[in-house]
Amino acid sequence: MPELLLGIDVGTGSTKGVLTDLQGNIMKTHVIEHGVSTPHPGWAEQDADQIWWGDVVQVCRHLLDGAPHQGADVVAVAVSAIGPCLLPLDEQGRPLRPGILYGVDTRATAEIEELNALLGEENIFRFSQMQFTSQAIGPKIRWLQKHEPEVWKATRTLTTASSYLVFQLTGKHVMDRHTASHYMPLMDSQTLQWSDTYAEHICPLSMLPELGWSDELAGAVTPAAAEITGLKAGTPVTVGAVDALSEGLSVGVSEPGDLMVMYGSTTFFILVQDTPTPDPRVWTVGGAFAGQHNLAAGMATTGALTGWFKHQLAGDRSFSELFQEATTIQAGSEGLLVLPYFSGERTPVNDPRASGIFAGLTLLHTRAHLFRAILEGVAFGIRHNLEAFSDLGASIKRIVAVGGGAQSTFWPQMVSDVCGVEQILPRTTVGASYGNAFLAGLATGRLQKADLQHWAQAREVLRPDRSNHAIYSELYPQYLALYQNNREVMHQLHAFRDRH
């Protein structure tokens, strides 16, 4: 009987599952597309049963349909998902409302200001090693209490997307420490344990899952979960992870100095550290393994911005056509700049009231100019984050590009040109589900950490074009000025939208 590992990842726009053998060879994959609900400006939600758990069930049924594999072939399971999210559950573990998503959901801006005033920004940073941003869950818990009191009254457990999937599989409430770090200010950043220091202002600690590391086991597949998924009852299940963490592992980002740049619906950064370097501009969180920390950062709209452009402004053009058109435009888009803050911005400006800008538009510019300028705007945003890492003395030894935007070399090459850095493109680009398969093997002792070198091999290295880097470096100060000089206007327009 084969020994197979099952990894499943629920992302912002799709869910992917992969079956591998112990050598990392891919036996079968399956992808399901899904959407995000935005019932109000600044909100981003997904249904926990129909999307998160429903997708996992469908993926399992497809992968384990007996052609040629079945549930009995799977020796371990690991899941990851978008995060940090907020999902309230009742006493029976049933969702009481749709899950509130990570930093793209900016509904708790007022609660962030309340907590800053109540607790003190310096105290929060000292305790959590990061400031409140739209990524933080503590303010969203306060929002839930204030705006949905009936939901709050029925709530017994607060969890996140990956933890809900683990609960459905095993009946255990557990959360990985990387995700839990964003449940600030409920976790002590020094001990990486839940703390009641500020709990009276957020929620009782009894409402939170147990904590674990992503390479540990949470439990085993229950008979009820086995019946609906096709997995074998008793199959080991890991603690779980946020999708970006598993994405990084899928391409070998596991040692101090390794940096992942994930080109997805958002751009996410994870730098592995053995010693944290806290800074208010970014996030200091727990790592995948005991003794490790991550310096993390994230932009709000990148792949989502290209999707917006395609659906709203590109007619029936495909992405491949849009990217091909962009190659016909010179670096710098003939003086057109885009500030990609179309859903506010996370790091390094941490401003949920920020908004997007097209600057320098003339009758000369075409659709191809607009699309290329969007890609360049994201690249400038990546440079802004990398410079923040550099400013605080974080050591970056190598950069690995992953995600849908890194499937071809065009966009990552542009980023290398803008930032003046080398990037590694991996051989296997299945994504977070592949990293989860590795975690499943690691947690059950079938794999060792050293085996990741075989699982995650490089395809090519992108090096910056010096002439393009010079052009982009001339434009970069203007990119920074777009936010600095227009911040107050953005905030006034945000207030106008709220009023009307």
Image (cartoon, rainbow, N blue to C red):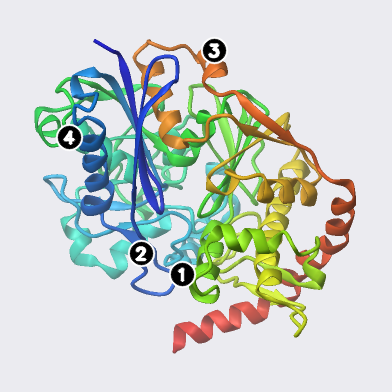
**CA gap, disc 4 to disc 2?**
35 Å
Decide which of tag 3 and tag 2 comes sooner along the chain: 2
Kindly report which numbered mark, 4 or 2, lies closer to the viewer in this rendering: 4
The residue nearer to you, when weighing 456 against 107, is 456
Question: Residue shown at 70%/55% (left/top)?
Answer: 379
Q: Quadrant of the N terminus?
A: top left
Q: What's the amino acid at mark 2?
A: Trp
Q: Is residue 341 above or below residue 288?
A: below
Residue type, label 4: Thr
Q: Closer to the N terminus: mark 3 or mark 1?
A: 1
Q: Would you say the residues marked 4 and 3 are in contact, meaning their CB atoms lie under 8 Å apart? A: no
Closer to us: 26 or 498: 26
Which comes before the other along the chain, label 4 or label 2?
2
How far apart marks 1 and 2 lie (CA) works out to: 9 Å
Query: In the depicted view, which residue is nearer to us: 329 or 353?
Result: 329
Q: What secondary structure is found at the residue carrying circle 4?
A: helix
Measure how far apart labels 3 and 1 are at the Cα level.
46 Å
Q: Residue at x 40, y 54 (%)?
A: 13
Tell whether 197 sits left or right of 404: left
Question: Which three-letter amino acid code belongs to the residue tagged 3?
Answer: Ala
Q: Nearer the viewer, mark 1 or mark 4?
A: 4
Q: Are marks 4 and 2 in contact (CB under 8 Å)?
A: no
Q: Cα distance, mark 4 to mark 3?
A: 31 Å
Residue 89 located left or right of residue 112 = left
Q: Which residue is mark 3?
A: 450
Label pair 1/2, CB-CB below 8 angstroms: yes
| Residue 229's disc number | 4
Amino acid found under the numbered disc labelled 1: Ala
Local secondary structure at mark 2: helix
Q: Position of residue 193 (x, y in %)?
A: 41, 32
Instruction: Say which residue label 1 marks.
Output: 110
